[in-house]
Image (cartoon, grey):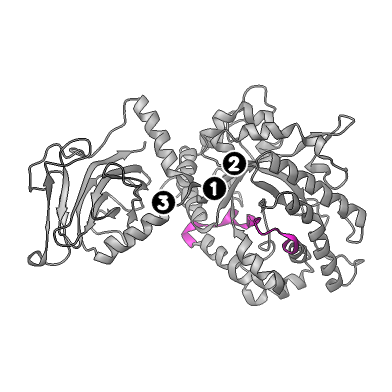
């Protein structure tokens, strides 16, 4: 095995630290779509168990209430009705109840949309009403335990709210008005909910996808766009603990094979800052997050649709997986997935399917979709969930024969394990073998002494791209570093950084580790390496070694 000491030990320790991040720092997938257009909080609660199987971390929940006359109020009349907290108060305990479910831990209330009819930038009363209604929405989100507010200002009705019209004041003057209105709309939001997340389908990416940095400012001015000015008003009043997510709906067509998601983050971080007022640039750098939207219809539509992704490795679920995993890797925290034709769950019979949608689930068209979502966002929780299912079915299997090292002779490396050190054999130092006096729960384990750089190796041949495996082991003693590396059919190592296993705190002299891995394209062999970096006379042990297929 051609592996350097630095790659085996130093990188292993660094990656282990990164992988042990707090659960609150994990990337999250939020679900939305036409299927939710008619869904109430009661509907989500009635179908909560089904949603928990989807793998989502949260959903977009429409704000729904009643005025004093019993008339429905909500997002559709946010510009025209005067809201009060009492109109929506019945939602609060139900939103709290939703949080008991994994799929609803990070919900967002659906709020601001572009108006159906343009509001004059000089209309103080209309903008004050909108600001007050947004403040009420923030209070409901805060008290209901929602992570924040969701907004989508795409101009569906062609009202051209955020573009200068011929009868408007001059462009520069109008930009000042738009900035003022942005501050007015969001001042109450951040006053009531100081650590809110506002997830917008677009922030500064709107209208600027792939625009060269040198042309961003002239492009905005040439289009007479008022959106950046409005967002600068939002930045003027954003509270220090709040976060603004540029959800970048252009990512519907992004392709991981082109590294589109990484390119977009570079644009959000560097190019688009030119549109931010100098006094707001520190806030922008600190509080604006890059996010992405994925459009599920792209993966089920026919080939003649302009919204179409072809299969990769024979599967359109695989296409989605690659895009989702790169989106999550590139995003700061949130990725949202949206669909129009189908449903996330098979709703209970009394649910009224939204107009324009079918009762079929996305999983029915894209087999394995929900496992992809769940395993991408929380691999440890997914592994526990799948293990429970497989144990109940009697199919939970450790592929490592002798994983407990029970078949062991002192001084020899027991089968099926091997050992490896870099360089020529005559330069190898220390020893690999088996200890018959110390183990986890028994008296046997793998043991290495005085090896400055090297590893035990377990080879699992016959793996197939896309398969998921749970790797487990326990370690004790000196510096240890477990990882997964891959070989192709030609016997060559794939040119990719090894995946390193995070270990927990030592308990009873043992540190336990788990790692979920997905077999990459072209791999046919998994090598589970149990590495050491020891001083002369220093020892390290491994035991309870497992490779479990998550099928």
Label placed on residue 58: 2
Side of 257 where 142 appears, left or right: right
Distance CA(mark 1)–CA(mark 3): 16 Å
Q: Quadrant of residue 481?
A: bottom left
Label placed on residue 20: 3
Instruction: Determine contact: label 1, label 2, CB under 8 Å.
Output: yes
* 370 is higher (above) or lower (below) than 277: above
User: Can residue 296 be seen?
Assistant: no
Q: Residues within 10 Å of mark 1 (few under 14, many from 20)?
A: many
* Residue located beneath label 1 in the image: 28
* 39 is higher (above) or lower (below) than 1: above
Query: Which image quadrant: the C terminus?
Result: top left
Query: Which image quadrant: the N terminus?
Result: bottom left
Side of 319 where 96 appears, left or right: right
Residue 315 spot, x, y in % from top left: 44, 45
Q: Residue at x 37, y 60 (%)?
A: 14
Residue range highlighted in magenta: 234-258
Instruction: Determine contact: label 2, label 3, CB under 8 Å.
Output: no
Mark 1: secondary structure = strand
Mark 3: secondary structure = loop
Distance CA(mark 2)–CA(mark 3): 22 Å
Mark before the other along the chain sequence, 1 or 3: 3
């Amino acid at each position: 095995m051609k592996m350097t000491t630095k790659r085996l030990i130093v990188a292993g320790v660094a990656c282990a630290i990164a992988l042990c991040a707090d659960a609150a720092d994990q990337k999250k997938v939020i679900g939305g779509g036409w299927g939710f257009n008619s869904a109430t909080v009661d509907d989500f609660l009635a179908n909560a168990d089904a949603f928990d199987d989807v793998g989502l971390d949260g959903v977009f929940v429409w704000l729904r209430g009643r005025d004093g006359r019993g008339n429905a109020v909500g997002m559709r009349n946010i510009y025209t009705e005067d809201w009060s907290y009492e109109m929506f108060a019945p939602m609060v305990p139900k939103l709290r109840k939703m949080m008991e479910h994994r799929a609803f831990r990070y919900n967002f209330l659906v709020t601001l949309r572009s108006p159906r009819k343009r509001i004059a930038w000089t209309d103080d009363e209309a903008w004050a009403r909108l600001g007050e209604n947004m403040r009420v929405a923030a209070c409901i989100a805060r008290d209901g335990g929602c992570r924040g507010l969701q907004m989508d200002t795409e101009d569906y009705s062609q009202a051209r709210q955020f573009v200068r019209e011929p009868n408007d004041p001059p462009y520069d003057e109008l930009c000042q008005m738009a900035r003022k209105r942005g501050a007015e709309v969001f001042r109450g939001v951040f006053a009531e909910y100081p650590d809110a997340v506002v997830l917008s389908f677009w922030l500064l990416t709107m209208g600027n996808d792939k625009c060269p940095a040198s042309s961003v400012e002239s492009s905005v001015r040439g289009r007479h766009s008022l959106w950046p000015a409005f967002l600068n008003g939002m930045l003027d009043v954003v509270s220090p603990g709040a976060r603004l997510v540029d959800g970048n709906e252009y990512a519907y067509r992004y392709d991981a094979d082109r590294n589109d998601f990484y390119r977009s983050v570079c644009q959000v971080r560097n190019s688009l800052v030119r549109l931010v007022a100098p006094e707001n640039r520190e806030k922008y750098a600190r509080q604006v997050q890059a996010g992405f939207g994925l459009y599920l219809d792209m993966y089920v539509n026919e080939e003649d649709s302009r919204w179409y992704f072809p299969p990769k490795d024979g599967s359109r679920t695989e296409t989605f997986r690659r895009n989702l995993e790169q989106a999550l890797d590139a995003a700061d925290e949130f990725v949202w997935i949206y669909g129009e034709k189908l449903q996330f769950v098979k709703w209970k019979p009394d649910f009224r399917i939204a107009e324009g949608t079918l009762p079929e689930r996305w999983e029915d068209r894209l087999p394995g979709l929900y496992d992809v979502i769940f395993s991408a966002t929380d691999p440890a929780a997914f592994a526990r969930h799948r293990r429970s299912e497989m144990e109940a079915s009697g199919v939970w299997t450790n592929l490592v024969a002798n994983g407990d090292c029970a078949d062991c002779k002192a001084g020899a490396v027991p089968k099926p394990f091997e050992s490896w050190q870099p360089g020529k054999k005559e330069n190898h130092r220390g020893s690999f073998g088996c200890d018959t006096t110390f183990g986890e729960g028994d008296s046997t384990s793998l043991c290495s002494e005085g090896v400055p750089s090297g590893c035990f190796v377990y080879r699992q041949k016959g793996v197939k791209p896309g398969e998921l495996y749970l790797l487990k082991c326990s370690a004790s003693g000196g510096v240890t570093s477990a990882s997964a590396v891959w070989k192709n059919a030609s016997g060559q190592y794939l040119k990719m950084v090894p995946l390193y296993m995070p270990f927990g705190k030592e308990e009873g002299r043992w540190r336990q580790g788990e790692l979920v891995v997905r077999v990459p394209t072209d791999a046919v062999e998994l090598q589970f390496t149990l590495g050491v970096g020891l001083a002369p006379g220093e020892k390290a042990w491994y035991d309870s070694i497992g490779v479990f297929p998550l099928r």
